[in-house]
Amino acid sequence: MTEERRAHDLPEGLPPTPDIDIDRLKATLLKLAEFGYDDSVNAVSRLGFGEADMAARRWLMELMEAEGFSARMDGAGNVYGRLGPKEKASVTMGSHLDSVPSSGIFDGALGVITALEILRTFKAAGIEPNWPLELVATSEEEGRFGGMLGAQAISGDVTPEFLMGAHDADGNRLADAMTAAGLPPLGALEARRPPSSMRAFIELHIEQGPVLDTVGKTIGVVESISGVWKWIIHLRGKADHAGTAPMDMRSDAFMGLADFAHAIPRIIDEHGTDKSRLTVGKVELKPGNPHTIPGEAIFTLVGRDSDAQVMRELQDACNRSLSAIARRHGLRFEYEQVSWLDPMDCSGRITDLFDTLAARRGLSYQRMPSGAGHDTQFLTRITDAGMIFVPSVGGVSHAPDELTHWEDIETGAQLLADAAWILAHEPG
Ligand SMILES: [Zn+2]
């Protein structure tokens, strides 16, 4: 990053950002919510590469073409729309169009429709920026097939082995789902964007957590996106009769798991940070009979932090704790690491820009980490990328009750527009 591109030196003489139209944004977002909407549960299901997801993608492309933005879909199913010449590097905005099953209407969709609203606003203002503005609606962000496929394809982080081998929890293959959607699976390898084709990436997303709603702030400027690992842990003891085996002569695998669960707060105190999370989310006891001492406990441990070194120290501490607990209870302990995703820092240039612009508008905002994964984390690999959050009421997300107030959406969308306005007018 060069000094003259430091964001807080706002360009002199640039006219103010045109105002976005919140009513138009709202109407378009509600129209998008009709794709995959189930009114019996008031929720949206647009699973990656499913029918509703692909129908929403085609609708978005037709809408953008009709409004004069050149639209296209790449080999990974990412939809692009553009204002400005296609040969120049873009200032790109967006998020994902797919959802988890029975989702709310804002997760991902908000970032896509805000990007469209910004394209519309800038086009209507009739000003030709120095750099083209681009919308991207990424595919398969929610990890139905175990990745963040659209964003990973853009950053060049997918392999043929993954494309041909991945499947969802019901055993449906990614390759079959993509083929049914009209996308030859290996075409995703061609979705990679060279770093020279993008000047910046900015994303607006709902927080999906309770922080902003609790502290009463409107904007979160995301500094880092947590890394995450997943272990599957086995504690093996001895399944015995629950009546005949004395309490001091048992190898009870559940007691080992319970001791470990109690050790988690101490492990985080001693080895973690305020951004650390350790979660035992899925547990199976075998043989699973009320009158039998559990001979085996199989459970997941998911760990997160925004620093890879801290993640490794947490892993070491969990390993030592589980070994000691296993010895104490006469258990055997094994684990398998199923996944590891590095933490990512957002671009300092972009976070500085959001800070500066939020302060200029007198908004209540704060810097914060993201505990959840987002498209931005892969875009940081090829360009200056950053994101902002708007509050989720009660922190609810990935559920039908997901809600963000329209006045907060207007504030967040206008702040994203401010950033796009500056970035698109940089000299060059
Ligand atoms: Zn999302």
Image (cartoon, grey):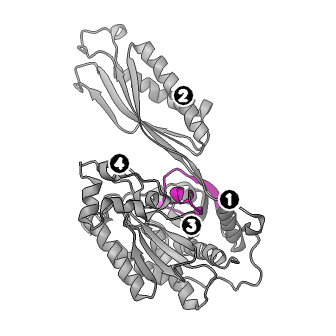
The magenta region covers 366-393
Ligand 1 under 8 Å from disc 4 Cβ:
no
Of residue 266 and residue 379, the one placed in the foreground of this image is 379
Question: How packed is label 2: few (under 14 Cα within 10 Å), some, or many (20 or more)?
Answer: some
**Is label 4 in a helix, a strand or a loop?**
helix
Residue at 30 percent across and 65 percent down: it is 183
What residue did someone put label 4 on? 161
Q: Earlier in the sequence, mark 2 or mark 4?
A: 4
What residue did someone put label 1 on? 348
Q: Nearer the viewer, mark 3 or mark 4?
A: 4
Percent position of residue 299, x then y: 36, 32
- Residue 200 appears in the figure: no
Q: Is residue 381 magenta?
A: yes
What residue did someone put label 3 on? 201
Count numbered badges in the picture: 4
Residue at 36 percent across and 52 percent down: it is 160
C-beta proximity under 8 Å, tags 3 and 1:
no
Percent position of residue 203, x then y: 53, 66
Amino acid type, label 4: Glu
Percent position of residue 389, x then y: 55, 63
Question: How packed is label 3: few (under 14 Cα within 10 Å), some, or many (20 or more)?
Answer: many
Amino acid type, label 3: Phe
Per the model, the C-alpha gap separating discs 3 and 2 is: 35 Å
Question: How packed is label 4: few (under 14 Cα within 10 Å), some, or many (20 or more)?
Answer: few
Q: Quadrant of ligand 1?
A: bottom left
**Is label 3 in a helix, a strand or a loop?**
strand
What residue did someone put label 2 on? 316
Q: Earlier in the sequence, mark 1 or mark 2?
A: 2
